[in-house]
Image: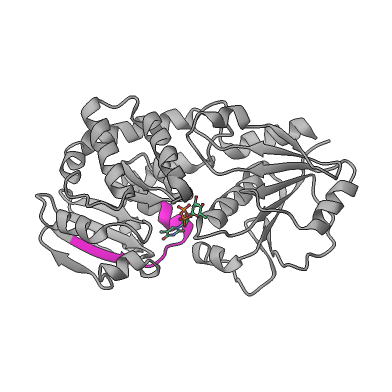
Amino acid sequence: MALRTLDLFCRVVDNYGDAGVAWRLARQLADEHALQVRLWLDRPDVLGKMEPRLNPAVPQQQIDGVEILRWQEDFPETEPGDAVIEAFGCPLPQRFLDAMARRRPTPVWINLEYLSAETWVEGCHGLPSPHPRLPLTQYFFYPGFTARTGGLLRERDLTAKREAVQRDPQAFWRSLKLAAPQESTLVVSLFCYPDATLLSLFETWAQGERPILALTPGGENNPAWRNAGIRDPWRQGKLEVQPLPFLSQEQYDRLLWACDLNFVRGEDSFVRAQWAARPFVWHIYRQADRAHLVKLEAFLRRYTQALPPSAALALVRFHEAWNESASPAATWPALAGELEVLRRHAAAWERQLRSLAGLASQLVIFITGKI
Ligand code: TRH
């Protein structure tokens, strides 16, 4: 049997990443794999921030071939599709699970996990987990950075779109109503968690030698910016800070492509920064017992493997400070001194990642093999 219909469930735990990843995946499955996709989302308002075409007040709507439905507590009787994906282990409604168990054939059921660069991921990717009561088996699907994982979300036309903006970013700057930055200016995008040491970072940049333009999309929603007193554009020493509104996901991608250095966070912007083929700094999502630092180290170990020792050290030290909410004053000069090396490395890393199969294609192949 062929794979035609798919239900994707997503609960927003926190922030934007859950909805952001689910939306990218849903669109890609519909667009590139011609699947009929239903995206069940408990917080359409969160997606509405990234997708201006979405009306969060409407419980059911169609965008880019994806049917977006508000996931309500009182779940309606629904015939499940050929495959069901729960994003990040969000428990499915009991009524829907019962319907999955009744369906013939039963849907292929996937738990799409969070991204990690840790080595154990390869051993867990694709493992089955039988339901304790119902005749259903769930499969763990792990995104990752190696051929033995589910890979990363990457649209077919991503490279071409990125290269077009990077060849000529003028139209993009105009679309943000910004003048094109001077060649000598280091253009930085900043997206981070509220515990970031922004004021120290800005003081360090203001006192540096190179002009820096810091663009801060969505800063108005982040207490870190409010604490740093950023509302309007301002200048100090070599630094100019330009607040930007929270951009659509597509515009945010372009911003990452157009900048020289991107500060990103969580999961989705972290992946998109890698596709931007430009240096980046990752503010990882904090977890209990400092588990996030193990993940950070695992990623940095992979990412820095092919870097000269001085650039690797500069990048690791800066990440340690940034993720421990320490002042970046001591670690910034070394990082700034390695930016050219890091730029070449980011391009090589992107090419290497691009040589692996993308997540949506791998998912379709995996599901088709189980149908
Ligand atoms: O918002 P996040 O912190 O999301 C996090 C992570 O996903 C984390 O792993 C998860 O556990 C937690 O949520 C619950 O960061 P992330 O993952 O980068 O998601 C941000 C999304 O917002 C991403 O899809 C890009 C998008 N975005 C825009 O569309 N416009 C913008 O202006 C900005 C700054 C982001």
Quadrant location of the N terminus in the rendered image: top right
Asked if the magenta segment contains residue 343, the reply would be no
Q: Which is nearer the eye, 25 or 93?
A: 93
Residue 183 appears in the picture as rendered:
yes
Give how far across and how far down residue 273 sits, in percent.
39, 45
Instruction: Report the coloring of the rendering.
Output: one colour
In the image, 354: left or right of 139? left
Q: Farthest residue in the front direction?
A: 289
Q: Against 309, is 61 above or below?
A: below
Give how far across and how far down residue 179 sits, in percent.
24, 62
Name the image quarter holding residue 312.
Answer: top left
Numbered range of the magenta stretch: 240-253
How many marks the image carries: the answer is 0
Which residue is at 37% across, 34% downward? Answer: 300
Quadrant location of the C terminus in the rendered image: top right
Which residue is at 10% across, 55% downward? Answer: 207
Give how far across and how far down residue 36 sits, in percent.
73, 50
Q: Which is nearer the eye, 151 or 139?
A: 139
Give how far across and how far down residue 39 sits, in percent.
68, 56
Which residue is at 60% across, 66% downward? Answer: 44
Q: Which is nearer the eye, 43 or 119?
A: 119
Residue 161 appears in the picture as rendered:
no
Asked if the magenta segment contains residue 251, the reply would be yes
Q: Against 33, is 50 above or below?
A: below
Which residue is at 20% across, 43% downward? Answer: 331
Name the image quarter holding residue 69.
Answer: bottom right
In the image, 242: left or right of 67? left
